[in-house]
Amino acid sequence: MNSPSDEAQRLAQRYSQMTDGELQEISADRVDLTDSGRSALLAEMQRRGLAETTATPNGYDEVEFRDLITARRFRGLSEALIAKGSLDSAGIESFLVDDNMGRIFVPTFTGGVRLQVRPEDLDAVNEILNEPAPESSELTDDEPSEP
């Protein structure tokens, strides 16, 4: 069985034979390396004057912060989902906030479910959400029905 120092020497030798690109590729996934592997890799990169490559570890998403505003508040989750569906079908990205709280608790206790959008979409959102609902969803004789 190899001792940690033997492992570190073996890895240092291996990394010294790799190209700069290969080292940077490994550096991007260094969270998967052992402590000895990380130490040997970083030592070789420092020796060559290479910058550490930072990448999002596998299984993690990068966080993207957006400037969003609340366009509407809804008492019930179903109303919020209908409004979000209307915006989705119009190609406007929207997000429901506190919707899980609305599923667990009575929404009026939590302040309701908030529908958030980008500020530049607010006028279009208001126009869509202020449209009156259709009078009836029943089919008339002129419209074909599906089997």
Image: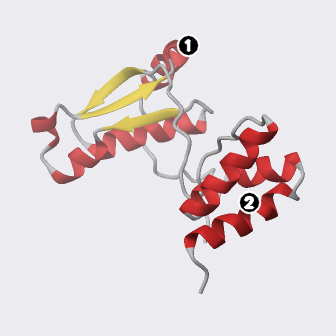
Q: Relative to 122, is 70 on the left or the right?
A: left
Q: Relative to 1, is 80 on the left or the right?
A: left
Query: Do residues under tags 2 and 1 come within 8 Å of each other at their CB atoms?
Result: no
Q: Quadrant of the N terminus?
A: bottom right
Whole-percent x and y of residue 31?
57, 56
For the residue pair 53 and 36, the one nearer the viewer reads as 36
The residue under the point 54% across, 32% down is 64
Q: Using a 10 Å C-alpha cutoff, classify the residue at mark 1 as few (fewer than 14 neighbours), some (14 to 19) or many (20 or more).
A: few
Count of marks placed on residues: 2
Q: Against 74, is 125 above or below?
A: above
What's the distance in space between the residues labelled 2 and 1, CA to CA?
53 Å
> Closer to the N terminus: mark 2 or mark 1?
2
Dot 1 amino acid type: Glu
Q: Which residue is mark 2?
A: 12
Task: Confirm whether residue 6 shows in the render.
Answer: yes
For the residue pair 130 and 74, the one nearer the viewer reads as 74
The residue under the point 9% across, 37% down is 109
SS of the residue at dot 1? helix
Q: Against 34, is 122 above or below?
A: above
SS of the residue at dot 2? helix
Dot 2 amino acid type: Ala
Q: Depth-wise, is mark 2 or mark 1 nearer the camera?
A: 2
Q: Against 39, is 81 above or below?
A: above
Q: Which residue is mark 1?
A: 120
For the residue pair 52 and 145, the one nearer the viewer reads as 52
Whole-percent x and y of residue 142?
63, 50
